[in-house]
Amino acid sequence: MSKTHFGFQTVDERVKASRVRGVFDSVAGKYDLMNDLMSMGLHRAWKAYTVAAANLREGERVLDIAGGTGDLARAFARRVGVKGVVVLTDINEAMLRRGRDRLIDEGLLVPTALCDAEQLPFPNDTFDLLSVAFGLRNMTHKERALAEMNRVLKPGGRLLVLEFSKVAQPLAKAYDWYSFNVLPRIGQWVAGDADSYRYLAESIRMHPDQAELKAMMKGAGFGHVDVHNLSAGVVALHVGIKC
Ligand SMILES: C[S@@+](CC[C@H](N)C(=O)[O-])C[C@H]1O[C@@H](n2cnc3c(N)ncnc32)[C@H](O)[C@@H]1O
């Protein structure tokens, strides 16, 4: 069996998917609180920027991949209105359930689908916009997932990938210290799980940087890709156009 990485560990490909599932099963209950604590609220600004960059119009069809607890799907649903549709998807039932319940509680009826981004259960050329926020990093075959995203997008449609990326060099030391010392402690304290947050820090280091991800997206068929660095590259938004 082929090998891949789970954080800094080398594991069989099949093992990675189940270890990732374990992480999100473990953190689902405290996911939103942890996001606010770990990023000091910044994830809200990164997502708001993504929603602005999406520039959605009423009536558009949107797929939120690895959508988890539904932050982006919720904002998108308000923009596309009743004539549009937003589908919230995730591979993890615990995360998706929380997302769906949360949106229903807020009066938003968003269709949900439990599915793997590497095998999307949608026909070709279906959506105007796709988003994947902090999800691509966890996928075993990123090229396969990006090719699937390209397949289900309409020609001219856009893919928004919001993901941790390579931070600017002057901040690297402080960021490493925070990631490997503070994050696991917050994880232990709030969610009773240091290991999942150690995985988070490691997986960020193993993820392709801005230029590599741009090349991967081009390789998957996105004719034009723009990169927006946020918070000095802690996070980057890649916007790809299917053309
Ligand atoms: C860090 S959470 C991000 C949730 C949400 N997008 C957000 O920004 O708050 C990552 C999500 O990716 C999902 N995920 C991991 N691998 C996946 C895959 N192969 N297909 C679909 N979702 C996946 C996980 O289940 C998890 O809910």
Image (spheres, rainbow, N blue to C red):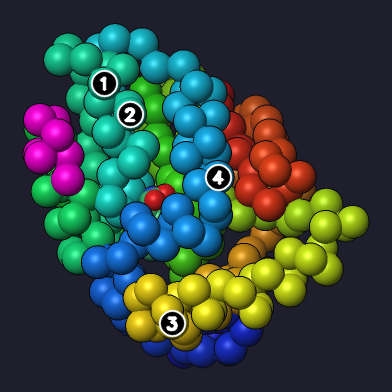
Q: Secondary structure at mark 2?
A: helix
Name the residue carrying label 2: 75
Q: Is residue 222 left or right of residue 84?
A: right
Q: Alpha carbon of mark 3 to alpha carbon of mark 4: how far?
A: 21 Å
Q: Position of residue 108 (x, y in %)?
A: 13, 31
- Crowding at label 4, few (<14), some or many (≥20) Cα neighbours within 10 Å? some
Name the residue carrying label 4: 42
| 57 drawn magenta | no
Q: Position of residue 84 (x, y in %)?
A: 21, 18
Mark found first going from the N terminus, 4 or 2: 4
Tag 1: amino acid:
Arg
Up-down relation of residue 84 to residue 104 (above or below): above
Q: Alpha carbon of mark 1 to alpha carbon of mark 3: how far?
A: 35 Å
- Res. 79 in view: yes
- Crowding at label 2, few (<14), some or many (≥20) Cα neighbours within 10 Å? some
Q: As rendered, which of 27 and 136 lies closer to the eye?
A: 27
Up-down relation of residue 84 to residue 148 (above or below): above
Name the residue carrying label 3: 188
Start and end of the magenta stretch?
102-108
Q: Quadrant of residue 82?
A: top left
Q: As rendered, which of 93 and 16 lies closer to the eye?
A: 93
Name the residue carrying label 1: 78
Mark found first going from the N terminus, 3 or 4: 4
* Label 2 vs label 3, nearer the camera: 3
- Crowding at label 3, few (<14), some or many (≥20) Cα neighbours within 10 Å? some
- Crowding at label 1, few (<14), some or many (≥20) Cα neighbours within 10 Å? some
Q: Alpha carbon of mark 4 to alpha carbon of mark 2: how far?
A: 16 Å
Tag 2: amino acid:
Ala
Query: At 47% across and 40% down in the image, what residue appears?
Result: 44
Query: At 54% across and 85% down in the image, what residue appears?
Result: 3
Q: Does the residue at mark 1 contact the one at mark 4 (Cβ under 8 Å)?
A: no
Q: Does the residue at mark 1 contact the one at mark 2 (Cβ under 8 Å)?
A: yes
